Image: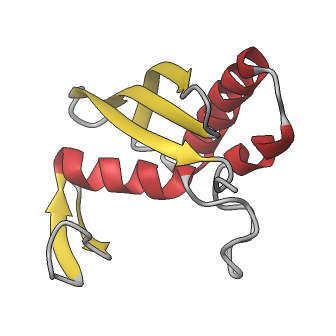
Amino acid sequence: MAVGVGIYNLDSDEFAKIKSGKELYSESVTRLLNTAPGERPYDPLFGCPLKYLVFEKDPFYIARSAQYMIQLALERYETRLELLNIKTTIKNGTRKIILALTLKVKATQEVFTIETDVELSRSV
């Protein structure tokens, strides 16, 4: 089983917490999806370019592009997991993509779902 340190634990007052299993994978995937390429100076390609969709207007195009971007990012940076399914929803009246990812841990064959959202831009 994978074990790691989760940093910036927003659910409690702890700065760092030992995490494992689904909790560790969920944090890793959420961090990957919310990081745009170029945000990390020592690994400028790390991340998922979802925020580049900020100026797109067509919800269908946004959803399909997001699915493709997520698949590529996970294949490149989260090799412990296999992507089984992506459900993308564009929240009406906002620039927020709601994601439900069904993933399988390659080492244990455990299947689980991560639900997260990515804000494309701030409301003005």
* Quarter location, residue 47: bottom right
Front residue of 115 and 95: 95
31, above or below 80, in the image: below
* Rendering coords of residue 61 (x, y %): 78, 20
Picture residue at 23% right of the left edge, 55% below the top: 2
State which quarter of the image contains the C terminus.
bottom right
* Quarter location, residue 7: bottom left
Front residue of 32 and 10: 10
70, above or below 120, in the image: above
Q: Is residue 26 rendered to the left or right of residue 54?
A: left
* Quarter location, residue 19: bottom left
State how the image is colored. Answer: secondary structure
* Rendering coords of residue 114 (x, y %): 33, 35
Picture residue at 60% right of the left edge, 60% below the top: 35
Q: Furthest residue to the front?
A: 124
* Rendering coords of residue 54 (x, y %): 77, 45
Counting the numbered discs, the total is 0
Front residue of 14 and 78: 14
53, above or below 17, in the image: above
Picture residue at 66% right of the left edge, 75% below the top: 40
* Rendering coords of residue 96 (x, y %): 57, 39
